[in-house]
Image (tube, rainbow, N blue to C red):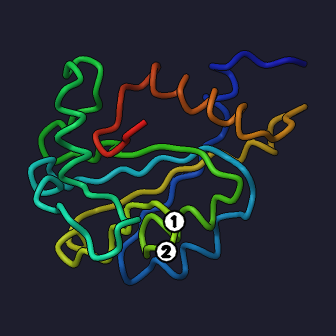
């Protein structure tokens, strides 16, 4: 059976609440499989905007990401309501566990958020949601296909404020 794009994107997503203290345990539950993922937080946009230049040039400058997203009309971006969690980043990768680790712990030589290297961000709530694409019937992995699904997800849900492309 061939699924529509929306049926694929509405397939079973797994959600993990994580903190700095539980990150290592959470990593072991995420498979080393290709998929889509999203990162949500209750961190206010203005707090994220406070983090500019990073010691590792591969770690994203959050201020620049937020400022760039401000150029997109707000009806097309994902915005926080009050103190609720909201999606600030989504993407795809061939290894979901690796990408979780990079975005929260950092990585040398790979572009990533490295969120928990910023102590202030450890105070907020964080959720990593993922969709294992190999669980979908007839899925054959390719970077192009994952990129297509990622872009369609952004059209459907809005643009996360820490995404750059």
Q: As displayed, is residue 31 above or below residue 120?
A: above
- Quickly name the residue at label 1: 110
Q: Nearer the viewer, residue 1 or 47?
A: 47
Classify residue 100 as left or right of residue 145.
Answer: left
For residue 88, what is the image quadrant?
Answer: top left
Task: Determine contact: label 1, label 2, CB under 8 Å.
Answer: yes
Q: Nearer the viewer, residue 59 or 43?
A: 59
- Quickly name the residue at label 2: 107
Q: CA distance from mark 1 to mark 2?
A: 6 Å
Classify residue 38 as left or right of residue 31.
Answer: left
Q: Residue 145, how many percent across, how many down?
A: 72, 31
Q: Residue 3, how many percent across, how many down?
A: 78, 19
- State the SS at label 2: loop
- Exactly how many numbered labels are in the figure? 2
Q: Residue at x 41, y 57 (%)?
A: 127
Q: Residue at x 47, y 47 (%)?
A: 38
Q: Nearer the viewer, residue 140 or 56?
A: 56
Q: As displayed, is residue 84 above or below residue 137?
A: below
Q: Badge 1: few (under 14), some or many (20 or more) residues near its Cα, within 10 Å?
A: some
- State the SS at label 1: loop
Q: As displayed, is residue 125 above or below residue 92?
A: below
Q: Residue 161, how many percent across, how many down?
A: 28, 40
């Amino acid at each position: 059976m061939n699924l529509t794009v929306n049926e694929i994107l509405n397939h079973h997503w797994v959600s993990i609440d994580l903190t700095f203290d539980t990150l290592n345990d959470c990593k072991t539950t995420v498979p080393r499989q290709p998929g889509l993922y999203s990162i949500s937080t209750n961190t206010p946009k203005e707090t994220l905007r406070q983090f500019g230049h990073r010691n590792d040039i591969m770690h994203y400058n959050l201020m620049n990401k937020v400022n760039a997203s401000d150029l997109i009309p707000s009806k097309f971006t994902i915005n926080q309501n009050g103190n609720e969690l909201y999606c600030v980043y989504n993407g795809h990768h061939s290894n979901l566990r690796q990408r979780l680790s990079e975005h929260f712990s950092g990585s040398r030589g790979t572009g990533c958020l490295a969120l928990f290297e910023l102590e202030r961000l450890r105070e907020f709530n964080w959720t990593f949601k993922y969709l294992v694409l190999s669980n979908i019937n007839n899925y054959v992995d390719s970077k192009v296909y994952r990129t297509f699904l990622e872009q369609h997800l952004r059209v459907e849900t809005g643009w996360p404020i820490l995404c750059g492309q």
